[in-house]
Amino acid sequence: MKRWITLYSVSVLVFSVLSGCGSHDAPAPVPPPDVTVSRPLEKEVTDNIEFTGTTSAVESVEIRARVKGFLERIAFEPGAKVKAGDLLFVIDRRPFKAQVDQAAATVASNKAQLELAEVRVTKTKNLYATASVSEIQLLEEQAKRDVEKAQLDMARAKLESAQLELDFTEVKAPIGGRAGVNLVDVGNLVGAGDNTLLTQVVKDDSIYVYFNVSERDLLKYKRKYLEIRTGEGQQKEDPKAYLALADERDYPHEGVIDYMDPKVDPSTGTVRLRAVFSNSKGLLMAGLFARIRIPVETRKAFLIPDLAVGIDQRGEYVLLVNKDNVVEYRPVEVGQLVERMRVIEKGVSTDDSIIVNGIQRARPGSKVNPLQSPPATKASAPATPQSPGK
């Protein structure tokens, strides 16, 4: 009897537990994740070709001693801007001044000798006219006069040479630019055995950039160049080029291409070009690494934020949301970067809703809740998303 009572109690307890469990509702389904979508921006973009190169001085001159002597004075500050004709160094002038004085005295002596010879020729001519002297005597006096004239010319040349050496004791800047450090100190003997290097002056108000261009890019450039040069109603001008330094994202420096080698190097398939840039602020200097961008064509293209473009083993892709709010995987062909916007050459249209935010929550084939964002003019963070019904 007790066994039946126990079994009955257990049965009632189990039934109560099962009845209590059945009274709760089933768990609610998880809502689809929110993602921000935006349609591609269609606008005009300029196709560019980009290269790397190095900067070079427009003019650079080594300043050397042209005469032998002791360095007496340094007349500039290393690294300072100098103008053409500014005094840089002074070499002891005294020995050269003495040579000038000696050469000048020789000139004066020879000039006096020539004047005396001219008097003798005149006198001999008068005597010859009266048959007082022979013709040979006249010819001798004329020859002596010609010798004195040659001696005077030689003395004058020596004076000019001595004056040049005296002038060379003042070493002046042949061009304007920035002076380097003095490589010789005051008191040292310079110009002994060779033309001692004293410093250098580099012209830096503008700068050259040399870079190599492949055959394919060369043809693009040539077509653009010919269009600029021969286009109807267009003013002839040099093609534009833009420069970016190693720490610059954009290309803030504008210049022009002013030279191209006359032939392609067959061993490399490239040709060297040169662009010139203004350097009024003094930021550019010779020997820097540089990136060059040359605009070649303007056209319409689709742009999306660069962060919306993914890459896997198959290449670049974007995730978009279809009309059923399902995520789709779309392979694309990408182009250049324009103000943080990526040009899409193939794979999207104006009707596509590209996921630009929340990509990590989206999976191809899964549903999402798209929040519409207007197309961004620059690929900064998308504008504040709004639901389609708002």
Image (cartoon, helix red, strand yellow):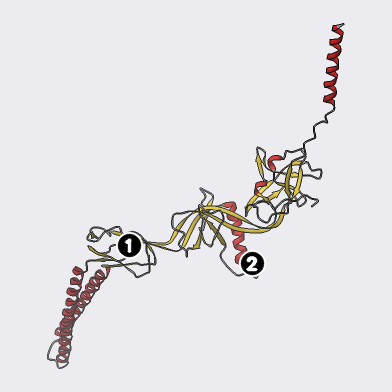
Circle 1: residue type? Ile
In the rendered structure, are the residues bearing label 1 and label 2 in contact, judged by CB atoms less than 8 Å apart? Answer: no
Observer able to see residue 347? no
Q: Indicate the position of residue 78 as horizontal and vertical percent values.
A: 34, 61
Direction from residue 16 to residue 83 in the image, left or right: left
Disc 2: CA contacts within 10 A as few (<14), some (14-19) or many (>=20): few
Q: Residue furthest top?
A: 1
- Dividing the picture into quadrants, the one containing residue 63 is bottom left
Q: Nearer the viewer, residue 76 or 173?
A: 76
The N terminus, quarter of image: top right
Q: Nearer the viewer, residue 31 or 345?
A: 31
- What's the distance in space between the residues labelled 1 and 2, CA to CA? 46 Å
Query: What secondary structure is marked by label 2?
Result: loop
Q: How many marks?
A: 2
- Dividing the picture into quadrants, the one containing residue 376 is bottom right
Disc 1: CA contacts within 10 A as few (<14), some (14-19) or many (>=20): many
Name the residue tied to disc 1: 63
Q: Which residue is depicted at the point 26% across and 65% down?
A: 73
Q: Which mark sits nearer the N-terminus, 1 or 2?
A: 1
- Determine whether 302 is above or below 258 in the image: above
Observer able to see residue 108? yes
Q: Indicate the position of residue 325 as horizontal and vertical percent values.
A: 79, 43
Q: Nearer the viewer, residue 276 or 272?
A: 276
Query: What secondary structure is marked by label 1?
Result: strand
Name the residue tied to disc 2: 231
- Dividing the picture into quadrants, the one containing residue 322 is top right
Q: Residue furthest front?
A: 2
Circle 2: residue type? Gly
Direction from residue 52 to residue 227 in the image, left or right: right
Q: Indicate the position of residue 336 as horizontal and vertical percent values.
A: 63, 51
